[in-house]
Amino acid sequence: MADTEKITINMSVVDLGKVDLLVEEGFYANRTDFIRSAIRHQLTRHDEVVQQSAVRKSMVLGVLSYNHQELAQLQERGQRVACRVVGMLVIDDDVEPELAQATIESIKVMGVFKANKAVRDALADRML
């Protein structure tokens, strides 16, 4: 699987037992397989709402990544970006905190934000 994140959920013992029964009966390989399947089902069911909301909020669906070269080009043109992502925002390790501050106006991530600690600290006041 591509980049994944670990989550923790609480379930009633009866629901957990039902999941285990479905696994034992061969419907799912394991508990994780069941949970992923249930999540995918719900996301598919609500896909149109997610798409409309992302468009309305001008958010990228997927992975948005910036490296030093891309941000340096924005800086040369005097441009700044507002990073709005449903998925993952990646600021590569070659980006210096000062460059990130000069080019990234704001950040809103519904999902995962990956950047080195110095960049995350430099942009902390821009997180929405």
Image (cartoon, grey):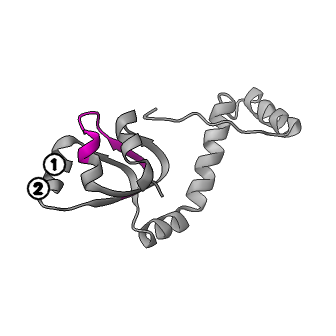
Asked if residue 98 lies left or right of residue 44, the reply is left
Q: Which residue is mark 1?
A: 72
Q: Which residue shows up at 29% across the image and 50% down it?
A: 101
Q: Position of residue 61 (x, y in %)?
A: 41, 56
> In the rendered structure, does residue 64 fall within the stretch colored magenta?
no
The residue lying toward the viewer, choosing from 124 and 11, is 124
- The quarter of the picture where residue 116 lies is top left
Q: Are marks 2 and 1 in contact (CB under 8 Å)?
A: yes
The x, y position of residue 27, in whole percent, is: 70, 35
Residue at 48% from the left image edge and 58% from the top image edge? 128
Residue at x 88%, y 38% (from the top left corner): 14
User: Circle 2: is it few (<14), some (14-19), or many (20+) Cα within 10 Å?
Assistant: few
Tag count in the figure? Answer: 2
Quickly name the residue at label 2.
76
Q: Label 1 is placed on what type of residue?
A: Ala
Task: Mark yes or no: residue 67 visible.
Answer: yes
- Considering depth in this image, is 118 or 48 the residue closer to the camera? 118
Q: Over which residues does the magenta segment extend?
A: 83-99
Image position of 86 with respect to 13: above or below = below
User: Disc 2 residue type?
Assistant: Glu
Would residue 86 be visible to someone looking at this image? Answer: no
Q: Is residue 90 magenta?
A: yes
Left or right: 58 with respect to 47? left
Q: CA distance from mark 2 to mark 1?
A: 6 Å
